[in-house]
């Protein structure tokens, strides 16, 4: 989406995002390229911005939590997010800067849900239990890599950096993650040579070549609504 009147970016680091949202009492997840690099355990490219996801239903609590920041709703232009205004679909992006600063520091994306299920914004047939949307690496909750790649490649205008992210992440998905992504991108893979070649190269790989899946701590999962403390195993 091209935004009219957007300013320069000086994104917070992953660690700074973690500190900022440590006391936020609702689930949130690091997203975008930073999430994929966090999954991989290394920075594979330069990132010009940083994204987090929160559930749409929690947006007013988030707005109050970030009261000392300037919050701008992104559509075709950037407009102030007035206090108490609930952002309905299709509005889903909020750009955040420190007051009196020209620099944007992070972006918020709103996730639609139905009860305890998350809903994919481009196809409401795709989704799942909210507890399966992300996991924690270190102390940073991140969107699961296969879901992030679905966001990147379920649109027609994916970029060279998206292909870079796919090339780096795809070999590290476990069998369940790989098959989930391939099934949901089947139409795009069939019609896009760049995607078809990449998925063919990794189709039916040996389990020993795949990253072990991250498993949720069931005792902690039930406390997601107060704070995400899920730790990966294995």
Image (tube, helix red, strand yellow):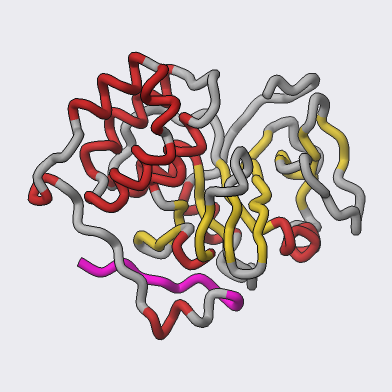
Residue furthest bottom in the image: 219
The image shows residue 187 at horizontal and vertical percentages of 44, 28
Compared to residue 215, the image places residue 118 above or below, namely above
Tell me if I can see residue 109 in this picture.
Answer: yes
Q: Is residue 201 above or below residue 182?
A: above
Q: Nearer the viewer, residue 183 or 81?
A: 183
**Count of numbered labels shown in the rendering:** 0
Give the answer, above or below, for where 186 lies relative to 138: above
Q: Which residues are magenta?
A: 225-234
Q: Is residue 92 left or right of residue 180?
A: right
Q: Quadrant of residue 1?
A: top right
Q: Residue at x 37, y 22 (%)?
A: 190
Q: Position of residue 65 (x, y in %)?
A: 74, 63
Side of 24 relative to 76 (left or right): left
Residue under the point 62% across and 47% down:
124
Is there any visible trace of residue 97 in the rendered image?
no
On whether residue 205 falls in the magenta region, the answer is no
Question: In which quadrant is the C terminus drawn?
Answer: bottom left
Residue placed furthest toward the top? 193
């Amino acid at each position: 989406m091209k935004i009219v009147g957007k300013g320069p970016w000086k994104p917070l680091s992953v660690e700074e995002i973690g500190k900022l949202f440590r006391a936020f009492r609702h689930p949130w997840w690091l997203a975008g390229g930073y999430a994929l690099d966090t999954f991989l355990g290394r920075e594979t490219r330069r990132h010009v911005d940083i994204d987090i996801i929160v559930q749409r239903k929690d947006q007013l609590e988030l707005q109050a939590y970030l009261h000392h920041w300037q919050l701008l709703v992104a559509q075709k232009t950037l407009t102030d997010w007035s206090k108490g205004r609930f952002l309905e679909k299709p509005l889903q992006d909020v750009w955040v800067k420190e007051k009196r600063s020209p620099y944007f520091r992070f972006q918020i994306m709103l996730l639609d849900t139905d009860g305890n299920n998350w809903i994919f914004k481009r196809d409401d047939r795709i989704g799942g239990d909210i507890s399966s949307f992300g996991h924690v690496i270190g102390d940073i909750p991140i969107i699961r890599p296969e879901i992030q790649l679905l966001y990147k490649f379920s649109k027609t205008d994916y970029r060279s950096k998206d292909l870079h992210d796919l090339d780096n992440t795809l070999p590290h998905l476990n069998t369940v993650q790989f098959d989930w992504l391939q099934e949901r991108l089947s139409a795009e893979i069939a019609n896009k040579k760049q995607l078809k070649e990449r998925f063919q190269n990794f189709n039916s790989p040996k389990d020993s070549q795949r990253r072990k899946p991250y498993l949720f701590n069931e005792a902690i999962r039930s406390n997601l609504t107060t704070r995400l403390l899920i730790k990966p195993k294995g």
